[in-house]
Image (cartoon, grey):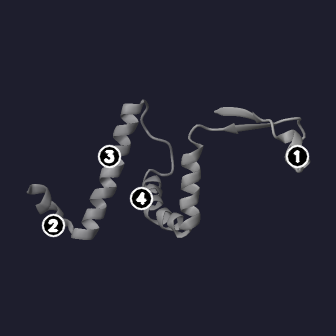
Amino acid sequence: MSRYYSSHCQQCHIKTNCTPSPYRRVSRWEHEDVLEAMQTRLDNAPDSMRIRRQTVEHPFGTLKAWMGATHFLTRQLKNVSTEMSLHVLAYNMKRVMNIMGTAAMIEAIRA
């Protein structure tokens, strides 16, 4: 975080609307420009978040429903990672079966 004080507050005609203190303290995160650029992109294309929500959130919602909307059954990061990987693999296999069919998927696995 970068914090700095503005020395121009004393002469500003709207100071009373901005801050009650003698000087305005401004805090800015070092990567604030990245957030501003992202917000600008979203402002220019408001439908992008709606599309992202439809394409990205659905698999996680499905996985959560399969897991029973509970916590992971295992402990420790490596075990939880394995459990999540198995859930993702099952999701992907089920999608392949729905798109290609079971016979085509088995043939692709054998190849």
Label 3, residues with CA under 10 Å away: few <14, some 14-19, many ≥20: few
Question: Which amino acid lies under the numbered mark 2 shown in the image of this protein?
Answer: Ala
- Which is more foreground, mark 1 or mark 4? 1
**The N terminus - image quarter:** top right
- Which residue does the numbered mark 1 point to in the structure image? 15
Question: What is the three-letter code of the residue carrying label 1?
Answer: Lys
Residue in the picture at 90% in, 40% down: 20
* 3D distance between C-alphas at marks 3 and 1: 58 Å
- Helix, strand or loop for disc 2: helix
- The residue indicated by pointer 2 is 104
> Mark 3 or mark 1: which comes first in sequence?
1
Read off the residue under disc 3.
Answer: 86
- Looking at the rendered image, the disc whose residue lies closer to the viewer, 3 or 1, is 1
At a point 30% along the width and 51% down the height, the residue shown is 89
The answer to whether the residue labelled 3 contacts the one labelled 1, judged by CB atoms less than 8 Å apart, is no
Quadrant showing the C terminus = bottom left
Above or below, comparing residue 57 to residue 35 in the picture: below
Q: Position of residue 16 (x, y in %)?
A: 91, 47
- In three-dimensional space, the C-alpha distance between marks 4 and 2, rounded to whole angstroms, equals 23 Å
Residue 80's image quarter? top left
In the image, what residue type sits under mark 3? Leu
Horizontal and vertical percent position of residue 38: 54, 54
Which SS class for mark 1?
Answer: helix
Question: At which x and y percent is residue 65?
Answer: 47, 56
N-term mark: 3 or 4: 4
Tell me the SS state at disc 3: helix
- Check contact, mark 3 vs mark 4: CB within 8 A: no
Tell me the residue that label 4 is attached to.
Answer: 59
Q: How many marks?
A: 4
